Amino acid sequence: MPRYAPPPESAAPPPDESSVRRWSWRAKALAVLATFGMVVAFVFEFLPPTSSGPDTTSTTVAVTTTAPPSPPTSL
């Protein structure tokens, strides 16, 4: 089967060492910390809820409204 396009060009030469940015230790530490945080958030997102945790008390507030009395009906 013939080609539909000309053969690809040769691969580009690798970039100069002077143009590649070196990571500082602070940037590396921040990347590790951010990666750890994302992994922890992902794991906690899919953990099932447990009832064995600390007991929480929920308070339920009942809201009552009073309607005005209906007018008397006369027949």
Image (spheres, grey):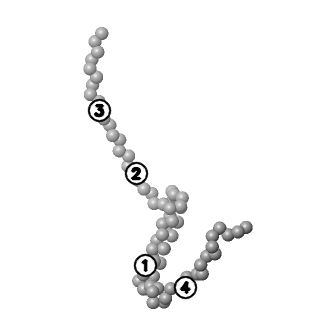
Q: Which residue is mark 2?
A: 58
- The outermost residue toward the right is 1
**Side (left or right) of 26 relative to 73:** right
Q: Nearer the viewer, mark 4 or mark 1?
A: 4
Q: CA distance from mark 3 to mark 1?
A: 59 Å
Task: Classify 59 as above or below 42.
Answer: above
User: Would residue 11 appear left or right of 36 to someone viewing this image?
Assistant: right
Q: What amino acid is at disc 3?
A: Thr
The secondary structure type at the circle numbered 4 is loop
Q: Earlier in the sequence, mark 4 or mark 3?
A: 4
Foreground of the two, 73 or 42: 42
Q: Nearer the viewer, residue 10 or 44?
A: 10
Disc on the earlier residue, 4 or 2 = 4
The quadrant of the image that shows the N terminus is bottom right
User: Residue 19, image x and y in percent?
Assistant: 45, 86
> Marks 3 and 1: which is nearer the front?
1
Disc 1 target residue: 30
Return the x and y of residue 49 as percentages of the image width and height: 51, 57
- Residue 44, image x and y in percent? 50, 64
The residue at the point 41 percent across, 53 percent down is 57
Residue type at mark 4: give it: Pro
Give how far across and how far down residue 15 sits, in percent.
Answer: 50, 85
Q: Which residue does the image show at 45% across and 77% down from the upper left? A: 31
Check disc 3 and report its element: helix, strand or loop. loop
Which disc number belongs to residue 66?
3
Q: Residues within 10 Å of mark 4 (few under 14, many from 20)?
A: few
**Marks 2 and 3: in contact by CB < 8 Å?**
no
In space, the residues marked 4 and 3 are separated at their CA atoms by: 82 Å
Which numbered marker is on residue 13? 4
Circle 2 Cα neighbour tier, 10 Å, few/some/many (<14 / 14–19 / ≥20): few
Whether residues under marks 4 and 3 lie with C-beta atoms below 8 angstroms apart, the answer is no
Question: Mark 3 against mark 2, which lies toward the viewer?
Answer: 3
